[in-house]
Image (cartoon, grey):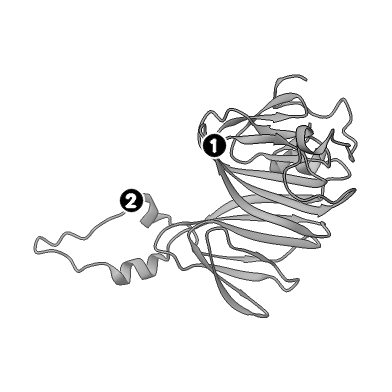
Amino acid sequence: MPIYTRDTLQSDRLPWVDIDDFEFFVLGRDVAAMKAAAPPPGPDGHVPFWGTYQLDPLPSTRQIVPASPRERIIVVAGEVSVETEYGRVTLKRRDFLEIPPGGAKLANVSIATVEIARIAGHWKQVIRNEVAMFEPRHPCDYHYHDGDEYWFVSRGHFTLDYDGAKYAMQPGRMMAAGMGFEHGVSAPEEQFEAIVFATQLEGRKRDGHLNRAMHGDPVKGRQVPADVDRAFLLEPA
């Protein structure tokens, strides 16, 4: 089934998959601002030292120039300032922004590290863009859609139920659930988070989770060859 890493998406992407690239990255705190706000040395002359973070800090800004027709960022944690040709906005957790052709400059304005997802592709429309969380007491029901849906895993390890088989999922993996392909997580081993990204509706154009009991048998609208890479397969259908 179409389970990808960033690398395998470049080499093994099926023709109907609308995603060209994805990544999670972090922006560190502004070290200069940290130093400016640091308290003066104590009576014994001690100055706080923050180890590797101080010696080799993460960059607190990043410039993004789109390489695909559509490109979007989603804030997974923290607060980030985004400046484009149209102005400047501040995004918090779960907020998202479509990057214009002229690009964008991102800057951490949080008191902690910021985590951001970047998704690039050639979709026509996004109908849902959410940071979803599931856990053992809060599983994800087995369902299908009248359109394609993608999961980008940011936290946790879990077993994905997909088209009758089971797959191992972890941070950095992406699921591409084509129209009519059933998927869910019936028994999460631990809490996990993923960005749920649903594109344009097709066929009967019913939104939401569809299941056999309430909505009838799914009609698959995508081709998935039998020899597609099954590197993450745990149990075959």
Structural distance between the alpha carbons of marks 2 and 1: 39 Å
Q: Which one is nearer the viewer's eye here, 80 or 107?
A: 80
Q: Quadrant of the N terminus?
A: top right
Residue 138: image tag: 1
Q: Of the residues under marks 2 and 1, which one precedes in the sequence?
A: 2
> In the rendered image, which quarter contains the C terminus?
top right
Task: Give coordinates of residue 220: x percent, y percent.
Answer: 88, 37
> Residue 72, how many percent across, how many down?
69, 61
Q: Quadrant of residue 73?
A: bottom right
* Above-or-below relation of 104 to 116: below
Q: SS of the residue at dot 1?
A: loop
Q: Name which residue lies at 73% across and 71% down.
A: 100
Q: Amino acid at mark 1?
A: His
Q: Which residue is mark 2?
A: 51
Kindly check if marks 2 and 1 are in contact, taking CB atoms under 8 A apart as contact: no
Q: Please give left or right for residue 31 compared with residue 118 in the image.
A: left
Query: Which amino acid type is marked by label 2?
Result: Gly
For discs 2 and 1, the disc positioned in front in the rendered view: 1
Q: Residues within 10 Å of mark 1 (few under 14, many from 20)?
A: few
Q: Residue at x 52, y 66 (%)?
A: 80
Q: Residue at x 84, y 29 (%)?
A: 228
Nearer to me, 133 or 57: 133
- SS for callout 2: helix
